[in-house]
Image (tube, rainbow, N blue to C red):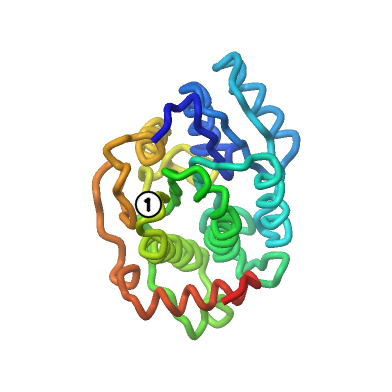
Amino acid sequence: MRPMEQRTILVTGATDGLGRALAADLAGRGATVLVHGRDERRGQDTLEEIRERAPGARLHWYRADLASLAEVRELAEAVRGEHQALDTLVNNAGIGSTVPGGGMRQESAEGYELRFAVNYLAGYLLTRLLLPVLRAAAPARIVNVSSLGQTPIDFGDVMLAKDYSGVRAYCQSKLAQVMFTVDLAEELAGSGVTVNALHPATYMPTKMVATPTSELREGVEATARLVTDPELDEVSGRFFDGTRPAQALDQAYDHDARARLRTLSHSLTDLPS
């Protein structure tokens, strides 16, 4: 990988929690950090906070609501328009099992189950649209912030219209991220672009968590490792629990299930097959 001072890194969901702390960490190391969020005021507050911690930090702000695939496309277009190469994409943005909306089933702008849409489909589409600038920067990395909380995808009811629970919706979306990670790693083999996923830490103090049991710095250190560690230059398609290699649920390694998810994801995001 190039020195951090020469790298451009996009962190989604960077105005709160892990994403905000990670963006500050990477900016402090000298990287140019593209800060994404869905609230303009929180975005500007984040930039100011990072610059206070790291004077001279090179930051760019991008606003997009990932509950809208149209806005995901606008985000990708803006990044591609301003950066000919992207060294790292960190798909961190996400929503928890109960926030927002409590226990009620919600839908995205396109009418998809909200957690599947935000936690998985948005990152899927963004990654696909940014692959040209990631390839242009190779060696480059994609990091998907997932979770140990996983449940198999029921392809007969992916949108959980029949049997909804926030926990199931969240855990299904997180397994989908890992399935995409494994699948994309095979597709990108030999391209110089690697893709890995991780469970950063358990119950960090973020707005998703009522009772934290770990410190935010643990998640930042684990995620930053996948972004920066030269020992991971050739590592791709892996899932990590913090800094330790781990196994996701069996469905993540099921070729047929991954193919079904890929076909569905292309269809839902209107990508060419």
SS category of the residue bearing label 1: strand
Give the residue pinned by disc 1: 196
Can you give x and y, in whole percent of width and height, for residue 99 in the image? 58, 53
Q: Is residue 258 above or below residue 75?
A: below
Query: In the image, what residue occupies the spot 40% across and 30% down?
Result: 217
Residue 69 falls in image quadrant = bottom right
Q: Is residue 187 above or below residue 141?
A: below
Number of residue marks? 1
Foreground of the two, 41 or 102? 41
Residue furthest to the bottom in view is 156
Q: Is residue 160 above or below residue 175?
A: below
Left or right: residue 196 compared with residue 52:
left
Query: In the image, what residue occupies the spot 61% across and 64% down?
Result: 114
Foreground of the two, 78 or 122? 78
Quarter of the C terminus within the rendering: bottom right
Left or right: residue 26 compared with residue 105:
left
Can you give x and y, in whole percent of width and height, for residue 139 in the image? 42, 43
Quarter of the N terminus within the rendering: top left
Can you give x and y, in whole percent of width and height, for residue 135 in the image? 50, 50
Residue 67 falls in image quadrant = bottom right
Crowding at label 1, few (<14), some or many (≥20) Cα neighbours within 10 Å? many
Left or right: residue 152 compared with residue 264:
left
Amino acid marked by disc 1: Asn
Query: In the image, what residue occupies the spot 35% across and 36% down?
Result: 225
Can you give x and y, in whole percent of width and height, for residue 261 in the image? 47, 75
Query: In the image, what residue occupies the spot 69% across and 57% down?
Result: 73
